[in-house]
Image (cartoon, grey):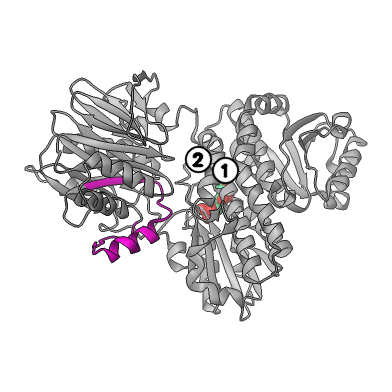
Amino acid sequence: MCGIFGYVGKKEAPAILIDGLKALEYRGYDSAGLYVAGAGLVKAVGQVKNLEAKLTPDFKGTVGIAHTRWATHGVPTEVNAHPHTDCEGKIYLAHNGIIENYGELKAELIGKGHKFASATDSEVVAHLLEDFVKAGSTFSEALTKTLAMIRGTYGLAIVNTSEPDRLYVARKGSPIVLGIGEGENFLASDPSAIVPHTKKVLYLNDGEWAILKTDSYQLFSLAGEEIKREPTVIEWSVEETKKGGYDHFMLKEIMEGDNVIKNSFRGRLLEDSLEIKLDELKEVEEKLKGIKRIIITSCGTALYSGMVGEYMLEEFAKIPVEIEYASEFRYRSPIVEAGTMVMAITQSGETADTLAAIREAKRQGALIVSIVNTVGSTIARESDAVIYNQIGPEIGVASTKAFISQVTIFSLLTLYLAKLRGVASDEETKKMIKEIVALPEKIKSILERREEIKEVATKYAGFTDFLFMGRKYTFPIAFEGALKLKEISYVHAEGYGAGEMKHGPIAMIDPNFPTVALCLSDSVYEKMISNVEEIKARSGKVLAIATVGNETLKTLADDIIYVPETVEFLESIIAVIPLQLFAYYIGIGKGYDVDKPRNLAKSVTVE
Ligand code: M6R
């Protein structure tokens, strides 16, 4: 995820800005840049040290902004790296977030004669500011007018070269924190970069903007009214700030769940008109109309999200879908007929087997449409079209937030393809869209009860074997729940379709082999209850994941974790959160480093 840092004071800014960027490196990025008032603009692709190497001894100044970019619009190049500027190089800005209506704004500004240098959404902000200033607004007025025009999310740090003693900063949706020092002030997207300088911080709220000078700060509302607020003191260490105050990246990433869903559908789901808009598929739209079959191929957690996607696409978009382990697909002489679309699902975009699988599919002429989190990664580059997750890098080795984002994107893609193929009823699509919009709050309500899940995990921490079972949309969740537990707690766990129990696994059931049963109120609920009865009849222990209000399971299961109600189509997202937390708490209870489980790598770039 992009990082922003800014400094205004009496010391030399370049070195402080570079240190600020280094403190934000852990967030992941692909290019970096800085602007120092009076000295100029420097950018570099790759690591911050590449940027540092470009700074000459005469590059001096005491006010500046810096940015690490994690590409969302436009490939990682120097031109696309921040800060961006207006036509005349008078305004410089660094932006985190996504400007959803940048296309329309850019077209309008080009019509007025503005010249754009980059492919980013961010640059539009610099030109809008320029436009208002040229029309006679003060810079503050130009800023409030610009903020009123842009849709989407932003954390903005701006230098107006006509007022080189100050930084302008604004926030909506993307975090911005001010650091209040003695004769110097800071801004950053994340307090970990500020804590080495000062522990006095002031978090900007959504819809607020500020002016930061060497000895003062002023906060304003979007309406331009001044807001009085005192800084708070943070007690976190630098390491803790990187994890947002959580003990582990894995927990931080699980706890981001509600925002992950919002970011995944941001700009793609039009809440007013209840429509799905996937601009990234525009170029392949004609081909999509004619596809006869989809093959989804990936590995690990990404494969399980693909399994959910398979069910969604077949049920609602009425397209035949097959799910393939990439590691098998690449070697088993698959047949890819004309009219096949192959989808790679991947957080890293670099997984060796997934890459080999799409290369094989491409060789046979398939259209490749992928869901990728890492912009500019190899799989993204080799696909015909990419839907990016828009959720920032995942740092914990166990994939958590990527999974719920991948499934969210499958839900959008399903509704989009259903409409494109004329098989969607407007009423049903609108109902689904409303349910997608409601997901973040529902996820939040589960996350808020994490202590309850911790207690249940503590109760089950002594068992050495687990069975996870589900049906239909929770079938892949049984695999994913078992994988999470194996990965971070090194406990043996198996995921099974509940319908397969009688075909073998039920032989394993005894009081020492607990089952995690996914019994949500859906079309296969009665079947799941029968499976639970069968396990209880064999003295097996059952931890049920059930929909809130379910009374039946109280007399059947040993323990229950309740989740909010949603439509069956989306229940996998709701069901997986307690399993991620369950695995996390068992793992940390055993004292393991859940962020870096033994023998595992975040990106599996070799076979
Ligand atoms: O980067 P990718 O999404 O392609 O990675 C795929 C798998 O390696 C990954 O999901 C792996 O299974 C995770 N460790 C699961 O938590």
Give the residue displayed 64% in from the left and 38% down from the top.
Answer: 442
> Is residue 119 at all visible to an observer of this figure?
no
Disc 1 Cβ-to-ligand 1 distance below 8 Å: yes
In the image, taking residue 221 as reference, residue 303 lies left or right, namely right
- Would you place residue 176 above or below residue 215 in this image? below
| Residue 368, position as x, y percentages in the image | 53, 70
| Residue 356, position as x, y percentages in the image | 52, 67
Quick one: SS at disc 2? loop
Q: Residue furthest right?
A: 537
Q: Residue furthest front?
A: 136
In the drawing, what numbered circle is on residue 8? none
| Residue 403, position as x, y percentages in the image | 58, 48
- Would you place residue 335 above or below residue 33 in this image? below
Q: Residues within 10 Å of mark 1 (few under 14, many from 20)?
A: many
- Would you place residue 606 above or below residue 454 in this image? below
Amino acid at circle 1:
Thr
Quick one: SS at disc 1? loop
Q: Are marks 2 and 1 in contact (CB under 8 Å)?
A: yes
Q: For mark 1, what is the residue?
A: 400
In three-dimensional space, the C-alpha distance between marks 2 and 1, rounded to whole angstroms, equals 8 Å
Please provide the residue range marked out in magenta.
Answer: 92-120
> Is residue 17 at all visible to an observer of this figure?
yes
Quarter where residue 574 is shown: top right
Give the residue displayed 69% in from the left and 52% down from the top.
Answer: 431
In the image, taking residue 72 as reference, residue 419 lies left or right, namely right
Quarter where residue 536 is shown: top right
Disc number lying in front (2 or 1): 1
Q: Residues within 10 Å of mark 2 (few under 14, many from 20)?
A: many
Q: For mark 2, what is the residue?
A: 396
Give the residue displayed 56% in from the left and 49% down from the top.
Answer: 405
Amino acid at circle 2:
Gly
Say if the magenta span includes residue 93. yes
